[in-house]
Image (tube, rainbow, N blue to C red):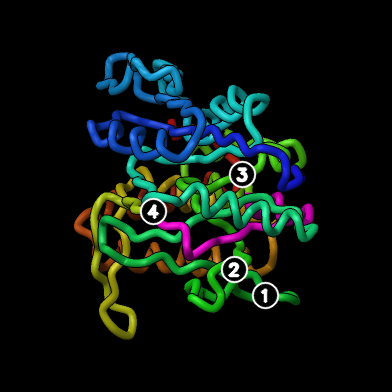
Amino acid sequence: MQPSDTPAIVHAVIVTFHPTEGLRGLVDALLAQVDHIHVCDNTPASGQRILTETVDPRVTVHAFGRNLGVAAALNHGIAKAHDQCTHVLLSDQDSLPLPGMVQQLLATCREHCDRGVEVAVVGPDFVNDVDEAALRFQAVRQGRSWLYPHIRPTTTMPVIEVAAVITSGSLIPTLAFDRGGPFHEGMFIDYVDIEWCERVRSKNMVCLADGRAKMRHAMGDASLRYWLLHWRVISSYSPLRLYYQVRNAIFLARQPYVTRAYRSGAMLFVLRKVYVYAFFSDRRLASLRSMVQGVIDGMSGRLGPRA
């Protein structure tokens, strides 16, 4: 752990895939809060590119010319930043940090490190741009719980220990990668953050969420209404994303380092996905086929990009 009197240097790593002009707003917002930005672009060579050139020396663009997946792109950016900074701030292209977000995450990280807590990651609070819903975190409780309870940060308890934080907006000390290892590139996309958080928590590191750090973020392609005791709304995903979500959830549930609470939650997650998309999606057949294939591949350990 870096002591609090060590000057903090924060590099951001943004993973992009066919980015829109909104990426420029994200870069501008981050430049006001971090020391350097690495844009890791997974867009194929024939695709649209934004920020292929930049006049700001604090922005470096790494264009792969093909889709390496979220995990591999993150690992590339982190490797480039590692020796030049004390902390890495990760971001998707469809996020927007509010002013002061990085500084608040950094303060929380250092406060807990000074208390002797080995912090793996600190994530912000955010509102989903797709359905305007505020994120509920899965909190960690003492003892062997069957499920992670969902809670929100409060004014009296703004910082909570959580099972995982989403990749976008997460601040990670570089030393956490030295001990916890890189992201699992076989996951490709989806559950990359959850797998890493479960893995570092098995090494007695702590994941935190700070309700005072704010971000806007878009999850899913649209919103989907479904009935379960009452009408609810969730983010809707394409059949391909459902494949990765189900496959990776099941694969991770079979790993020895995950908690019982994760395994129980993963099974409920898959069952709910099947129910929702079988009865309420306008792409029922394609979604069900993708999820069935996800179950098969998750059980057999077949990872990487879907053929």
Q: Earlier in the sequence, mark 3 or mark 2?
A: 2
- Element class at badge 4: strand
Please name whichever residue, 29 or 42, is drawn nearer the observer in this view of the structure.
Answer: 29
State yes or no: residue 199 in magenta: yes
Question: Can you give x and y, in whole percent of width and height, for residue 293 in the image?
Answer: 45, 47
**Mark 1 against mark 3, which lies toward the viewer?**
3
Q: Amino acid at mark 2?
A: Ile
Q: Mark 3 and mark 2: span between their CA atoms?
A: 16 Å
Mark drawn on residue 141: 1
Residue hosting label 4 = 215
Classify residue 301 as left or right of residue 55: right
Which of marks 4 and 1 precedes in the sequence?
1
Amino acid type shown at disc 1: Arg
Q: Which residues are magenta?
A: 197-214
Image quadrant holding the C terminus, namely top left
Residue at coordinates 45% horizontally, 40% vertically from top-left?
33
| Sooner in the amino-acid sequence: mark 2 or mark 4 | 2
Q: Which mark is residue 160?
A: 2
Q: Is residue 39 magenta?
A: no
Reading the image, the residue beneath label 3 is 172
Q: Label 2 vs label 4: CA separation?
A: 17 Å
Viewer can see residue 60? yes
> What residue type is disc 4 on?
Met
Q: Secondary structure at mark 1?
A: loop
Q: Under tag 2, what secondary structure?
A: strand
Q: Is residue 183 visible?
A: no
Residue 18 shown left or right of residue 245 in the figure: left
Which of marks 3 and 1 precedes in the sequence?
Answer: 1
In terms of secondary structure, where does tag 3 sit? strand
**Which disc, if any, is residue 266?**
none
Q: In front of the other: label 1 or label 2?
A: 2
